[in-house]
Structures are given as C-alpha cells and as structure tokens.
Amino acid sequence: MSRLMPILLLALAACAAPKPPESPGFRRAGTPIYSNAVFDAARLEGDWVQVAGFGAGCRPGGASFAAGQVRTKLCLGGREQDFAGAFAVTGPGRLALRGAAPDGIGAPWWVIWVDTDYRTLAIGTPDGSFGFLLNRGGPLPADRLTAAREIFEWNGYDLSRLTVY
C-alpha cells in the first residue's frame, strides 16, 4: 500500500490542477481556414455595415472601400478598432491593412465568403483573433446570415460567441 500512496497522491494532484486558460481567439486551434479563391477586390468598393462579429462589448461599425483605400470603425473581438489607409491584396481572398497593428485590426483579413452579388462579406483571421460580417444594400436577409454562420463554423469559429447586431 505504501508504494501506491505516491501514485494516488500524484493522480489526485493532477485532477486538482487548474485548467489551462482558453484561447483568446474565436477559432478552434488547428482547424484549417480557407479564403475565397475567386474573390474580386474591385467589387469591395462602397460602404458596408457591420452586422455581426465575434465577441461583444462594443457597438457595430462599418467599412468604406475606395481605390485601394479603406476606412473602418469595427467591433473586433469586443474592442472598437479604427483604421484609415491603404489595403493590399496579398493572395486569393486575402487582404492586409498597410501600417495597421498586426496584433489588432491589422491581422490578416481572409475573405472566407462573399455572396455572388457582393452584398454580404464574411472575414476571418487565421489566428482567430476576430471575425466579422459586413453587409450593404439594406437589412441582412436570414438566408445570407445562415450561409455566413455555416462558413464561419466550417472555418472553425465558435458560433456561440457570434454576436448578430
């Protein structure tokens, strides 16, 4: 019995060990993320309204795109973040905000879905630090919200943390 005591104490200590903190991101670690290979950045031009995002605690905003420039005020990961400046297309369905902090709004933006008429746009980040949904041309119809939710989930996002505005 004396030989079993240290093993039992170790097992009990392991059970009592605190759980590791949850990932600050909104995606499951190790889940692949896919960007839209046929995305046409020229069709971004115009004003977009933020209709959903991961995290809570701030008001939704929007984005305005024109000639390689973007002006944003978005609720990202529960923090209001602004940017005004140039953006670049870095790959199929991938955007980078030039000069933006890479640990905030400047994380790589991957277009994971856009409807065929470019009215609704789902953007995620490979590290899962944020994800959001933009819409233009009126209220977001239920069918496009459903499609966007499915795409976010497919790309590893935790839908229980999605706030729809």
Image (spheres, rainbow, N blue to C red):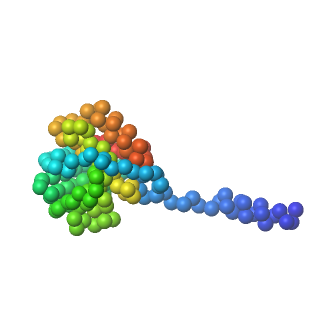
Q: Is residue 157 visible?
A: no
Q: How many marks?
A: 0
Q: Is residue 55 left or right of residue 10?
A: left
Q: Residue at x 22, y 67 (%)?
A: 99
Whole-percent x and y of residue 69? 15, 58
Q: Nearer the viewer, residue 16 or 123?
A: 123
Q: Residue at x 28, y 52 (%)?
A: 92
- The C terminus is located in which quarter? top left
- Give the residue furthest to the left: 67
Quadrant assignment, res 150: top left
- The N terminus is located in which quarter? bottom right
Q: Is residue 16 left or right of residue 72?
A: right
Q: Residue at x 77, y 61 (%)?
A: 8
Whole-percent x and y of residue 96? 25, 60
Whole-percent x and y of residue 68? 15, 57
Q: Nearer the viewer, residue 157 or 31?
A: 31
Q: Is residue 19 visible?
A: yes
Q: Nearer the viewer, residue 26 or 93?
A: 93
Q: Is residue 140 left or right of residue 148?
A: left
Whole-percent x and y of residue 76? 30, 54
